[in-house]
Every structure is written in structure tokens, then in C-alpha cells.
């Protein structure tokens, strides 16, 4: 939206700005009321800005309180998820091509195009269906989920949805093509080659080649170059949308996709599956002039891994305050123990000299020891293999403790690999057979609490408003409460009451934090558990109170 100093109703110079967006001015309140029906759709407390380094981004034009909706936007395109893991490629459940409801592959098919639908009566967009029906002659496998997923490629369907906008909605098509695609950066990369095999060739051979022969004027342009450009636009701009059903979609939005990436975001969003609108919310109190920031990567990763992921998938490097800080807000989630002489350990911490340079040297903060980036990268790869190998199974608490003991010789206690292991460990202490809460020694209970405190402190520094880490923090707080409740059972009188009060406070804190995830499958499941934990804690408090009063009465 471009601001103007003229009243849109009468055209005269005006000084009274719209109190919400500050972008439109009126000569009087009567003209503001008269113009509201036209203005309300675009009235948003944000402005589009441009920067040589950031590109286009969104800035708030007024103070906005945490939790308040900043703006609501309709999509350009919503469709199947873009990146498919090996598990996705073998999943028997996919999004219905018509309504995105979960449907089982091979059960129901669209009567015309034969693509998976949730029921025999579900229909989807007519033009899309007519193009997909051009490939209906190719017989689909009947039982093998991997083969069915390969036959009905969701990522290719997402590109086709984009391509069809040039016919369905020229305005949306124009807005889509204004988005960055990083075409030059993509050429020759693994992503470009994968898109050629999975998407471009698939669409041309299965549908678009036949479309040119049967309806040559339907789509003015559907060549390989344009398809690759659309792949680049999706890679760079798509937003992950998780429906309450557990289905994951990808969405492209003209303004929401302008939000700046940062490794400590200040807003989040909700998606309405019925209207397909996205609502962007303030994750914390925003001040006039703040940029709207979301995160496109895993904020529990270390800087170099986040940078690698962003360069690979989004074609840019992040220069946020966290990435520029070698200590990452004092969490040291990338830090190593000093790699000097093992016989003369200085107790220092190795940090990258330049966190944005993947080849940077790593310097100890205590001794003069410098280590080459190549050696650190090799070490990190080895550590990753060990952690991933263990976590791929169902490790026991003892197995995790042994690996933590080995890694502690090399990694900082808060390193993201040790964080992952510790987050699993706190859930095993108290739940693993032989390690039930009642069976834990006092030292084991104390260790569980110390680990919870360490993890909690890291999360609060990385994500102080729990915008991205609400699930992680809630699990930590529940496990804290478990340990405190067990300590209360073993402690007499007021000491036990103090433990229970602290446990209750932790659970209430978790209840507030988890509100962000109420629409997600994981959030709903965890909330059910949390409500039961709150009930059990209150019951334990009542029992303790009753016993204390009884004991006093007996005296």
C-alpha cells in the first residue's frame, strides 16, 4: 500500500490518518466512514519496504501488543507440501486433491482425473482437473504407497497450481511472478536437478506435452524455463502450513511471504483451512518501525547448520543478531570444548572467529589455540552420525548417558547435539522401565531437574516468547513438574508443599505457553496430557494439605 496525503473521497489535501494503518489520510471523519467499505480490506498496520540487503520486507506502522493479529491475507496458491522426506514418499495418507482432507492412497479417486480424493463425491477445481485428466491414461499402481506417491506427485501439483494462475487469475499470476526465484543461484545445484527430475520433466511428459497438442491456447507459456522459475519461487517463498488434521501444506502469499527471516522471530501465523486465509500474529510486543520476522529454519540448530540450510533451500545467508554473535545469545549451542592438548586442557570454549564464514577458524576463548574450519566440519559430521544413529532407534537412558559422556569431551554442554540428547533423556528418567519416578534415587531426580533447568534456559534465550519452541518448552516444564512432585512425595511438611507449589507453577506456565500450539496435532495431544498433569498435581496438593491438617489435629 502506498501512502497518500490526499483524501481518497474528495481529493483534497488531508491530515487525519487512518488510526490503524496510518497509510491513508482523510479530510474529515465523514469521508473516512464513507471510504471504509473500500479501505477495510487493505487496512493493515504494516507497510512494504525495500532494502538492498533484505529485499522486500514488512514494517509495522504502529505499536502492536503480543497476540494481536497484525493482518489477514488470502493466498495466491495453497497446495501439497513442497519438500518430501523419505517417510513422506512412503506415506499411505496424503492430502485430498480437492479439499486437503487426509485421504488414503488407492481408496477414492477423482472420477475424471483419477487423482486421490477423500470421498467419491469430492471434486476439485475444474481447470486443474481437466489438465490432470490428460495423464489419467497412465495406469497407477494399486497397493505400493511409494509407487502411488511417485505417480501422484504432490510437489509437481503445487507447481501446476501456480502455472494455472495465468489462466485463472492474471492479477495473482502477476503477483506470483514478482516473487524472488533465485534462478541464477539455483542453476547447477542439487535442488535444480531434483526439480528437473521430479517436477519439470514429470509435468511436461505426463500433462503439458499433451495439453499443447489438444489445447494449445489454454496456457500461453508452460515451458521448462518457466516451470523452473516457479520451482525457484516456491523454494524461496513458500510457507509451511500444518492443518489440525496433521496434513502439511505449502502456501504462497503476496505479503506474508515478504516477512523477513530471523533466527529469533517476533511473529507467527495461523492458517484457516476453510477460508485458506493466513492470520499473522505478533509473537511479542511490537514497536512502531519493527520488522515482521519469522524463521524458515530450525532455531535449535547451530549457526553454521542454519546457514547451510538457508543457503541450500532459500538461497540466502542470514545476518540476524544471533548469527552474528559467536555465542548465540550466550547459549553456546555451536560451541566446542577447547580442542587443544588433551593432556593440558585449559577448560576454555572454542568459538568461530567469523560465524557467517563456513570455513572460518575456531578460536579458544582462554588459550591461543586455533582450529581450522575443515577440521571442525569433519568433527561435527562425525558427531551428527553418532547422535542420529543412536536416536534413530529407541535408545535407553543408559545409552544416552554414555554418548553424552563421550561428547562432553568435545562439545559444550549446551551444544545442539547434547540438547537433543538431554531433551530425550529427561523424558526417559521417570518413564523408562526400571527408571520410574518412584525408583529414581535422589541424585537421579536432582540430575533430571538440572537437565530440565539447562534446557529451559537455552530455550528462553533462543526463543524468549516461545514462538517456535512452545512444544519443547512445555515438555521440559512437564518433566520439571514430575521431578518436583516426586520430591514432594519424599519430603516432609512444608518442604513438600513448596515442591508442589513450584510444580504447579511450572504446569501453569506450560499451559500459557502451549496456547500457541492449540491448532497443531502435537499441540492438542500435548495439551491433553498437560491438563491431566495439572489435575493430578492439584489432587496431590489437596491430599498433602488434608494429611497435614489431620496430623495437626492428632497432635
Image: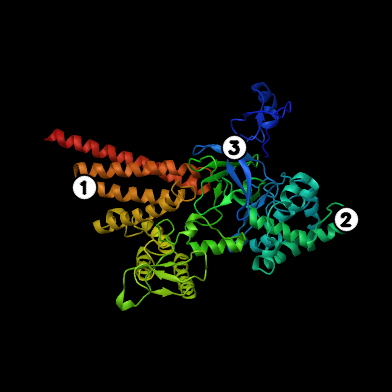
The residue lying toward the viewer, choosing from 537 and 324, is 324
Res 194 → quadrant: bottom right
Q: How many C-alpha atoms fall within 10 Å of the one at disc 1: few (<14), some, or many (≥20)?
A: some
Q: Secondary structure at mark 3?
A: loop
The residue lying toward the viewer, choosing from 528 and 502, is 502
Residue at mark 2: 216
318 displayed left or right of 169: left
Residue at mark 1: 491
**N-term-proximal mark, 1 vs 3:** 3
Q: Quadrant of the C terminus?
A: top left
Pointers 1 and 3 in contact (C-beta within 8 Å)? no
Q: Position of residue 89 (x, y in %)?
A: 62, 61
Q: Secondary structure at mark 1?
A: loop
Q: Position of residue 109 (x, y in %)?
A: 72, 51
**N-term-proximal mark, 3 vs 2:** 3
Q: Residue at x 75, y 64 (%)?
A: 201
Residue 381 in view in this figure:
yes
Q: Position of residue 511 (x, y in %)?
A: 42, 41
Q: Position of residue 163 (x, y in %)?
A: 76, 53
Amino acid at each position: 500500500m502506498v501512502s497518500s496525503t490526499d483524501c481518497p473521497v474528495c481529493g483534497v489535501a488531508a491530515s487525519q490518518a487512518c488510526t490503524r494503518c496510518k497509510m491513508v489520510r482523510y479530510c474529515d471523519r465523514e469521508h473516512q466512514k464513507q471510504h471504509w467499505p473500500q479501505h477495510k480490506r487493505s487496512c493493515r498496520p504494516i507497510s512494504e519496504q525495500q532494502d538492498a540487503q533484505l529485499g522486500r520486507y514488512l514494517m509495522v506502522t504502529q505499536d502492536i501488543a503480543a497476540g494481536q493479529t497484525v493482518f489477514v491475507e488470502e493466498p495466491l496458491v495453497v497446495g501439497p507440501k513442497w519438500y518430501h522426506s523419505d517417510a513422506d514418499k512412503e506415506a499411505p495418507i496424503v492430502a485430498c486433491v480437492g479439499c486437503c482432507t487426509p485421504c488414503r492412497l488407492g481408496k477414492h479417486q477423482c472420477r475424471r482425473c483419477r487423482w486421490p480424493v477423500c470421498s467419491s463425491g469430492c471434486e476439485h477445481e475444474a481447470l486443474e482437473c481437466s489438465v490432470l485428466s490428460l495423464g489419467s491414461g497412465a495406469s497407477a499402481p494399486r497397493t505400493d504407497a511409494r509407487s502411488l506417491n511417485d505417480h501422484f506427485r504432490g510437489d509437481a501439483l503445487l507447481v501446476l497450481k501456480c502455472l494455472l494462475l495465468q489462466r485463472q487469475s492474471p492479477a495473482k499470476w502477476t503477483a506470483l511472478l514478482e516473487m524472488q526465484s533465485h534462478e541464477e543461484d539455483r542453476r547447477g545445484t542439487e535442488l535444480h536437478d531434483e526439480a528437473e527430475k521430479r517436477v519439470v520433466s514429470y509435468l511436461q511428459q505426463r500433462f503439458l506435452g499433451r495439453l499443447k497438442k489438444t489445447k494449445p491456447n489454454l496456457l500461453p507459456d508452460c515451458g521448462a524455463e518457466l516451470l523452473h522459475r516457479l520451482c525457484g519461487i516456491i523454494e524461496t517463498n513458500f510457507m509451511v502450513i500444518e492443518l489440525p488434521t496433521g496434513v502439511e501444506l505449502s502456501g504462497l502469499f503476496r505479503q506474508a511471504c515478504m516477512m523477513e527471516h530471523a533466527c529469533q522471530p517476533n511473529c507467527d501465523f495461523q492458517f484457516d483451512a476453510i477460508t485458506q486465509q493466513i492470520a499473522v500474529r505478533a509473537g511479542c510486543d511490537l514497536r512502531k518501525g519493527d520488522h515482521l520476522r519469522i524463521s524458515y529454519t530450525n532455531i535449535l540448530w547451530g549457526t553454521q547448520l542454519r546457514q547451510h540450510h538457508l543457503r541450500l533451500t532459500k538461497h540466502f545467508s542470514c545476518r540476524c543478531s544471533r548469527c552474528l554473535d559467536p555465542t548465540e545469545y550466550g547459549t553456546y549451542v555451536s560451541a566446542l570444548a577447547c580442542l587443544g592438548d588433551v593432556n593440558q586442557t585449559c577448560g576454555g570454549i572454542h568459538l568461530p572467529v567469523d560465524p557467517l564464514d563456513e570455513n572460518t577458524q575456531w578460536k579458544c576463548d582462554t588459550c591461543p589455540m586455533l582450529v581450522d574450519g575443515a577440521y571442525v566440519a569433519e568433527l561435527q559430521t562425525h558427531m551428527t552420525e553418532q547422535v542420529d544413529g543412536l536416536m534413530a532407534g529407541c535408545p535407553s537412558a543408559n545409552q544416552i548417558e554414555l554418548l553424552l559422556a563421550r561428547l562432553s569431551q568435545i562439545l559444550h554442554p549446551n551444544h545442539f547435539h547434547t540438547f537433543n540428547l538431554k531433551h530425550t533423556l529427561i523424558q526417559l528418567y521417570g518413564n523408562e522401565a526400571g527408571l520410574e519416578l518412584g525408583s529414581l534415587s535422589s541424585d537421579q531426580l536432582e540430575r533430571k531437574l538440572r537437565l530440565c533447568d539447562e534446557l529451559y534456559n537455552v530455550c528462553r534465550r533462543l526463543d524468549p516468547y516461545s514462538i517456535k519452541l512452545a512444544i519443547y518448552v512445555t515438555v521440559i516444564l512437564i518433566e520439571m513438574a514430575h521431578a518436583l512432585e516426586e520430591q514432594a512425595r519424599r519430603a516432609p511438611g512444608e518442604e513438600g508443599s513448596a515442591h508442589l507449589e513450584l510444580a504447579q507453577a511450572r504446569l501453569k506456565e506450560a499451559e500459557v505457553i502451549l496456547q500457541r500450539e492449540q491448532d497443531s496435532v502435537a499441540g492438542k495431544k500435548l495439551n491433553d496430557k498437560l491438563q491431566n498433569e495439572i489435575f493430578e498435581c492439584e489432587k496431590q496438593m489437596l491430599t498433602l494439605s488434608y494429611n497435614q491438617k489431620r496430623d495437626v489435629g492428632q497432635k
